[in-house]
Image (cartoon, rainbow, N blue to C red):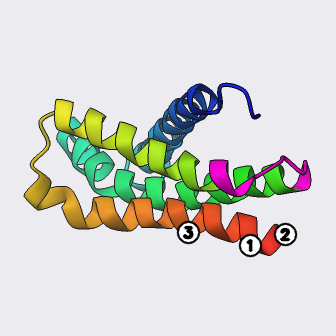
């Protein structure tokens, strides 16, 4: 893990983002087929916009926790460094993508902060509780 750590963490952060998007798609598909079928597409788009930050926070916490736990169990040298850098790189990539998408930060900042705090917390707890 020592060699090319930043590039590996960027790749892992992108893989995590893709995973969280897939989980969001699955959640919206389940919602549209099982919970609230037969609605207009705009209803499902609104639901996706409302639920995505929560999916990101909850499942992001779990993913970051499990990754940090894995690093500790595999006894990586200086595991605290990737435990801190992984969520930091994820948040930086998230900021770039959200800014490029033209999202109004005034409407989105609070949920963004909560969801990404959950990721930092998951990474930290995965480190602390496994050690």
- The residue under label 2 is 131
Q: Name the residue: 12% across, 36% down.
A: 102
| Pointer 2 or 3: first along the chain | 3
Does the magenta-highlighted stretch encompass residue 127? no
Q: Nearer the viewer, mark 3 or mark 1?
A: 1
In the image, which disc is placed on residue 8? none
Q: Position of residue 24 (x, y in %)?
A: 46, 44
Q: Position of residue 64 (x, y in %)?
A: 63, 54
Q: Name the residue: 52% across, 62% down.
A: 120
Classify 10 Å Cα crowding around label 2: few (below 14), some (14-19), many (20 and above): few
Q: Quadrant of the C terminus?
A: bottom right
Instruction: Describe residue 10's horizontal placement relative to residue 41 as left or right.
Output: right
Residue sitting at the far bottom: 129
Q: Which residues are magenta?
A: 73-82
Q: Position of residue 82 (x, y in %)?
A: 65, 48
Q: Nearer the viewer, mark 2 or mark 3?
A: 2
Q: Position of residue 112 (x, y in %)?
A: 30, 58
Classify 10 Å Cα crowding around label 3: few (below 14), some (14-19), many (20 and above): some
Look at the numbered disc 3 and give the secondary structure of its residue. helix
Viewer-closest of 113 and 42: 113
| Pointer 3 or 1: first along the chain | 3
- The residue under label 1 is 128
Classify 10 Å Cα crowding around label 1: few (below 14), some (14-19), many (20 and above): some
């Amino acid at each position: 893990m020592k060699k090319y750590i930043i590039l590996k963490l960027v790749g892992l952060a992108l893989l995590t983002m893709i995973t969280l998007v897939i989980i969001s798609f699955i959640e919206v598909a389940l919602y549209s087929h099982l919970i609230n079928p037969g609605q207009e597409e705009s209803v499902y788009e609104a639901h996706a916009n409302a639920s995505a930050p929560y999916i990101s926070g909850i499942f992001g916490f779990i993913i970051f926790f499990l990754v940090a736990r894995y690093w500790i169990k595999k006894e990586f040298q200086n595991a605290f460094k990737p435990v801190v850098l992984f969520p930091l790189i994820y948040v930086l990539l998230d900021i770039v993508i959200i800014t490029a998408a033209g999202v109004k930060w005034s409407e989105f900042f609070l949920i963004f902060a909560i969801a990404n705090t959950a990721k930092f917390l998951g990474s930290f707890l995965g480190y602390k509780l496994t050690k």
